[in-house]
Each structure stands twice: as C-alpha cells, then as structure tokens.
C-alpha cells in the first residue's frame, strides 16, 4: 500500500513530516495563525509561490510517496 508523507520546509530548512495535508496545515496554523490548508495545497501542487507579503513566504511542501508492507 502506498502512503503519502508531506514534508514541510521553511527557506529550504526541513521542519516536520506529516501523514496528511490537514495535519500539516493545522500544525502550522498553531504556529503562525490563519487558515493555511488551501495555500499549502497550492504550494505543494506548484500552482502558487507566495510573495514576501504572504505569511506562507518561504514555505515549501514536498510529497514523498512511500511503500508500506
């Protein structure tokens, strides 16, 4: 079974791994506030690069597909 893992980075520095995008957004919301799921999903999909005025500036989400036995 394939399992997606989401890794969160800030300015190229690894922060944390998450099992779901929801867990990723909730974790970051507890730190910087706001509702971040949609923005993080767009960053992950390569549809948006936040500018300097965005609270998500410098953040990156990478998807790692892993196999579980």
Image (tube, rainbow, N blue to C red):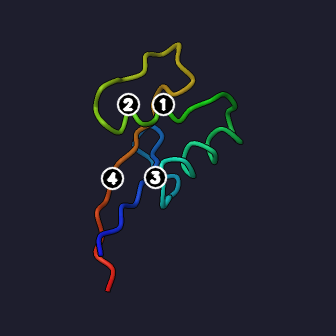
Residue 31, above or below 50? below
Of the two numbered discs 4 and 1 on the same chain, state the one appearing first in sequence.
1
Q: Quadrant of the N terminus?
A: bottom left
The residue wearing badge 4 is 63
Would you say the residues marked 1 and 2 are in contact, meaning their CB atoms lie under 8 Å apart? yes
- How far is the residue under mark 4 from the one under mark 3? 13 Å
Marks 4,1: beta carbons within 8 A = no
Name of the residue lying farthest toward the bottom: 69
Label of residue 38 in the image = 1
In the picture of the structure, the residue carrying the numbered disc 2 is 42
| Residue 63 location (% of width, % of height) | 33, 52
Q: Residue at x 50, y 58 (%)?
A: 18
Q: Quadrant of the C terminus?
A: bottom left
Determine the CA span between mark 4 and mark 1: 16 Å
Q: Which residue is mark 3?
A: 14
Mark linked to residue 5: none
Tell me: residue 2, above or below residue 9.
below
Residue 68, percent across and down?
A: 33, 80
Q: Could you tell me how far apart the alpha carbons at marks 1 and 2 are, in whole angstroms?
A: 6 Å
Cα–Cα gap, marks 3 and 1? 21 Å
* Mark 1 Cα-neighbour bin, 10 Å: few <14, some 14–19, many ≥20: few
Q: Nearer the viewer, residue 52 or 25?
A: 25
As helix, strand or loop, the secondary structure at mark 2 comes to: helix
Label 2, label 3: how far apart the Cα atoms are? 19 Å
């Amino acid at each position: 079974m394939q399992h997606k893992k989401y890794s969160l980075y800030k300015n190229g520095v690894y922060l944390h791994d998450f099992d779901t995008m929801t867990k990723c957004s909730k974790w970051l919301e507890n730190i910087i506030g706001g509702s971040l799921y949609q923005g993080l999903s767009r960053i992950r999909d390569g549809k948006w690069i936040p500018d300097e005025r965005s609270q998500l500036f410098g953040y990156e989400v990478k998807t790692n597909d892993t196999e579980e036995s």
